[in-house]
Amino acid sequence: MSTQQIALITGANKGIGRGAAEQLAALGMTVVIGARDPERGERAAADLRVGGGDAHAVTLDVTDPETIAAAARQITERFGKLDVLINNAGITGSGQVDPSRAFDQVPSTVDLDMVRSVFETNVFGVIAVTNAMLPLLRHSPAPRIVNVASHAASITLLSDPEGPFAGLLPSAAYTPSKSALTALTVQYANEFRKDGILVNAVAPGYVDTDSNDHTGFLTVAEGAAVLVRLATVPADGPTGGFFAADGPVPW
C-alpha cells in the first residue's frame, strides 16, 4: 500500500471544498474531489493537475447511497486507503441569497420538506459518507475527519440576545442542521478516540461563495485554511473539537 496521503473532500468542485483541495494538493497529498456533477468534478481535478497537484474526481452525491458506495469502491481499488475525509458538502435550504425568501426558515412557518432535505444533506449525508469510508480510513496510520459546520451551529452564540448573531432570522433548517453536525462530530470522536481517528468540526467563517451570493468577506483560501489545519493535525492534536481560524468556537 502506498505511503502517499489520500484525501477525499465532498462538494469539492467549487467554493471552500475546492479551496481545501488546492491547499492539500499543494502540501503533496493526492486529492479526490467528490462532486455530484461528474463533469464539474473532472474539470476541478483537471485544473488542480494543471497547477501541479495530484487530483482525481469521483461522482459523489451524499444523499445517494449508490454513488457513495461506488466512490468507496473506486478509492479502494485505486488507493487502498484514505487518510483524510472532509465532509464539506452542504446546502442552505434556501438556495443562494434571495430577499424574497428571507423568511423561508422561520420555525413557525417553515416547510418541513425543506427541513428534511437540509438534514438529509448536512447531517445524514455526513453519516452515510463517513461510515462508507471508515474501512478505508482504518487503513491509514493517521486518519483525520473534518466536518464543515458554521458559526451558526453555536447554540451559545445564537442564543445570546446581545451577541454577534442577534440580528439573524431564526432558522429551523440550516442552523439546527449544523448544530446537529457538531454534536455528531463529538459522538464520532468519542467512538474513535481509542483508534486514533481524530474527528473535528470547523467553522470557515463568512466566505465569498455561491451559497451567500458572494457577499462573504473572506476569500475561499482563507476559509479553507481551517479545514486544512484540522485535516493535518498531529497524533496529539485535538479530537471532538469545534474550531474557527481564530481558535475554538463555543458550543
Image (cartoon, rainbow, N blue to C red):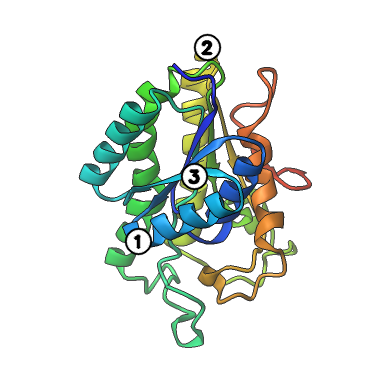
Q: Position of residue 245 (x, y in %)?
A: 74, 48
User: Residue beneath label 2, please?
Assistant: 194
209 relative position to 89: left or right: right
Task: For marks 1 and 3, give the CA distance.
Answer: 14 Å
Q: Residues within 10 Å of mark 2 (few under 14, many from 20)?
A: few
- 10 vs 135: above or below: below
User: Residue beneath label 3, please?
Assistant: 55
Q: Which quarter shows the C terminus?
A: top right
Task: For marks 1 and 2, give the CA distance.
Answer: 40 Å
Task: For marks 3 and 2, give the CA distance.
Answer: 31 Å
Q: Residues within 10 Å of mark 1 (few under 14, many from 20)?
A: some
* Observer able to see residue 221: yes
CB of mark 1 within 8 Å of CB of mark 2?
Answer: no
Residue farthest to the bottom, as pictured: 100
CB of mark 3 within 8 Å of CB of mark 2?
Answer: no
Q: Position of residue 229 (x, y in %)?
A: 69, 38
Mark sitting on residue 199:
none
* Observer able to see residue 37: no
Residue under the point 37% across and 74% down: 109
For the residue pair 57 and 214, the one nearer the viewer reads as 57
Callout 1 amino acid: Glu
Closer to the chain start, of discs 3 and 2, is 3
Closer to the chain start, of discs 1 and 3, is 1
Closer to the chain start, of discs 1 and 2, is 1
